[in-house]
Amino acid sequence: MAVKVAVNGYGTIGKRVADAISLQKDMEVVGVTKTKPDFDAKMAIKKGYRLYAAIPDRVKVFESAGLEVEGTIEDLLKEVDIVVDCSPNKIGAENKKLYEKLGVKAIFQGGEKKDVAEVSFNAIANYEEAVGKQFVRVVSCNTTGLTRLIYTIKKNFPIKKVRATMIRRVVDPKEDKKGLVNGIQPNPIKLPSHHGPDVQSILPDVNIITAAFKVPTTIMHVHSVAIEMEKDISEEDIKSAFAEEPRIMLFNSEDGFTSTAKIIEFARDLRLRYDLYENAVWEDSIGVVDGEVYVTQAINQESIVIPENIDAIRAMLELMDKEESIKETNRTLKIGV
Ligand code: NAD
């Protein structure tokens, strides 16, 4: 029988998580929540999701807009085995009180501090640590991208240290209240950025320092990564390690992939909402100089964490082991095909 899942916060991440769950045989979306009766709420109903009010006293706001809700988040939580909290940054920690009260397992997203959960999660790097857990945090888009890349190298070749610079999209494409129109913002100005410690919440033995800058673009982040290796390694070693990992996709400038704009144009033809669940690594960026590996990758922030949320559900509810779950998630989301 399929396990029952709630999605609390049907926004950028929540709608994608709900659609990905709908593609799995071993889990089902019982309901999704919204705080207001906007176009997203109407679309959720149109797609067949049962809609609940994320904030109980908003039920009347939905009703006066003519939108029928099935109840409140509390009603929804009573029907499910697990909730995927996709509420805005820091709200997940507030929502946790309700999950604890009702004894529901919960997955949080990367906008929460790591202490919100017992485990910070990345499927290929530490699936086993989430098995049977009550609270798990799927790390942010940047941390997911970095962790996948570093783990894929590290599992075959020992690493001495990592230095990474992240050029971050300033906001998601749907935003109209904030942004950066004409500037490059060091974020933070004083180094290092929080991304290094966040990677260490999954890979504690990795020596990593990160810097980050926001730029006026909405579609992807770009990471420039330098990895000092313990032993000699060749470009071919790195390329074949990446080629064997389905959650990393290799792109080549010879094929016309000269920027994130071209990668997203490719993804538009490939997937619903141009969701690119994979790290987009430029194959021809891979270089080795004096025992140091250089590589550049792009990350579609809206979709990279979606497969991780599906695997986290399976780990926490002990539905499948690591290999089986990742294989099934990859198959259903058409990752690596
Ligand atoms: P979003 O603003 O697009 O969606 C959040 C949703 O939560 C909205 O539908 C909002 O109505 C709803 N909401 C508001 N208050 C709520 C409450 N009290 N309880 C439940 N729901 C509530 O945000 P998002 O971009 O989807 O981000 C969600 C989480 O995912 C954050 O932790 C964020 O850091 C993380 N994340 C975002 C991205 C990204 O690029 N968008 C990538 C990775 C991780």
Image: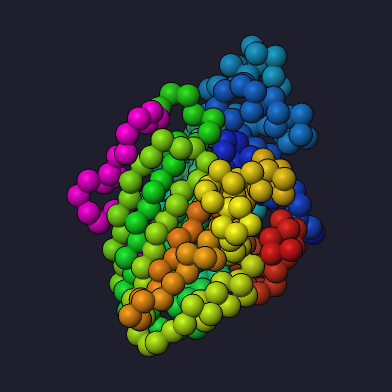
Task: Give the vertical position of 128 relative to 224 (above or below).
Answer: below
Q: Residue at x 69, y 64 (%)?
A: 336
Overall secondary structure of the magenta section: loop
Residue 197: x %, y % from top left: 32, 61
Identity of the residue drawn at 64% across and 11% down: 64
Name of the residue lying farthest toward the left: 190
- Residue 70, position as x, y percentages in the image: 70, 29
Rendering quarter of residue 187: top left
The residue located at (64%, 31%) in the rendering is 52
Horizontal relation, residue 260 to residue 291: left or right:
right
Q: Work out whether 44 lies above or below 103.
A: above
Report the quarter where the N terminus lies.
bottom right
Q: Quadrant of the C terminus?
A: bottom right
Residue 185 on the magenta segment: yes
User: What sort of colour scheme is used for the picture?
Assistant: rainbow
The percent position of residue 321, horizontal first and vertical second, equals: 65, 74
Does 325 appear above or below 220? Answer: below
Q: Is residue 129 magenta?
A: no
Highlighted range, magenta: 179-201
Which quadrant would residue 302 be assigned to in this image? top right
Residue drawn at x 38%, y 28% is 181
Q: Position of residue 127 (x, y in %)?
A: 55, 70
Q: Nearer the viewer, residue 260 or 51?
A: 260
Outermost residue on the bottom side: it is 231
In the image, taking residue 142 as reference, residue 14 lies left or right, namely right
Depth check: 333 or 259 in front?
A: 259
